[in-house]
Image (spheres, helix red, strand yellow):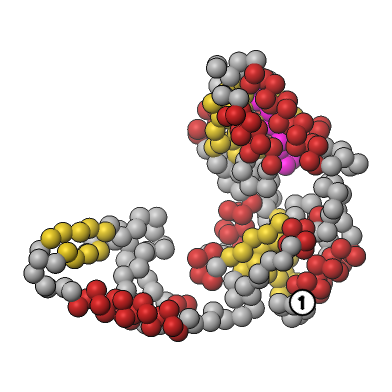
Amino acid sequence: MSGRLTCVGVGMTLGAHLCPISRSHIENADVVFSAMSDGFVELWLNELHHDVRSLQDYYAADKSRHITYQEMVDVMLAQVRLGKKVVGAFYGHPGVFAKSPHEAIAQAKREGFTAQMIPGISAEDCLYADLGIDPGKFGCQHFETTQFMLYQRRVDASAYLVLWQIGLAGDLIMGIVVTGREERQLLLELLAKEYPLTHECYLYEAPTMPLQTPRIDKLELQALLDAPIHLHTTLVIPPALALQDNHDMRRRLKQLAANKASTLGKPNGEQTFYAKPYAAVSADANNIGANAIDLPPQRNTDNVLPFIKTKRKL
């Protein structure tokens, strides 16, 4: 079959986050469907291709987003079935908080068409950069806010908690209208089980234009009730507890390391070596709860390249 579908992410900030391969797919497509976060971004996309069709028209205040997303899938697949090279261009990452790209790709593949997703810079990526958060330091939990409210989720208060689409907290109809103070009160009651109401948190919004600055409002949890919150506002709650040592696991790992070390130098024994990494490992005793010399070799979390594990017979 000649038709094909490619869903790409254009990033969050106009023109700044589009990668070369995504741009190439857009420029070489027969038709481009767009779901942008900003009208100016949509106008910019129109300069890259002569046939850009907005998906924003499928949203309506009195209409479930489930219906909207299915209509987006249907309109994109209709062009794929005509044998066209179709691109679905979505703001941020096309696979993050975006149902229709996943559904469209899955449906296209079921029908025998070639379909793929090209990642983009998401609001989560911008959040880490703008707030200076390294998710590998304390850990980071992410939830869609209404899902967080509706299901029994285990919150780790020693890690960051990120609640997406807080503006739709408690929305049961999949609408596009910001919910009210009453729904936020219920959310606050849920959060109060894990955090003091005076615990400081952040309301975050990624910039969509090059000259914009991110919204980073620091406030106490209890102030959420009357804070200005939009559809694209994200709630970031820093850790409220220190990391708790798993003493039994630490003891077992140290014993395992000692057992492996005891095999070194024995003839005819298979030994495991860790080659020198491309960047020096930095172990902060305050973060990991032990001196670096007490730990076995670890992956270097500050570098995309891991240790090179080699085996040889002596």
* Residue 198, image x, y percentages: 76, 80
Compared to 299, does 241 lie above or below?
Answer: below
**Type of amino acid at the residue the image marks with label 1:** Ala
Instruction: Answer with the quarter of the image where residue 36 lies.
Output: top right
Give 32 or 254, whichever is nearer the viewer: 254
Give left or right: position of 219 versus 94.
Answer: right
Tag 1 residue? 192
Front one among 258 and 28: 258
Numbered disc total: 1
Is residue 83 visible from the viewing direction of this image?
yes
Position in image of residue 51 (x %, y %)? 68, 20
Residue at 23 percent across and 61 percent down: it is 275
Q: Which residues are drawn in magenta?
A: 29-39
Q: Dot 1 surroundings within 10 Å: few (below 14), some, or many (20 or more)?
A: some
Q: Position of residue 247 (x, y in %)?
A: 45, 84
- Magenta residue check for 151: no
In the image, taking residue 144 as reference, residue 68 lies left or right, namely right
Q: Seen in the image, is 265 located left or right of residue 236? A: left
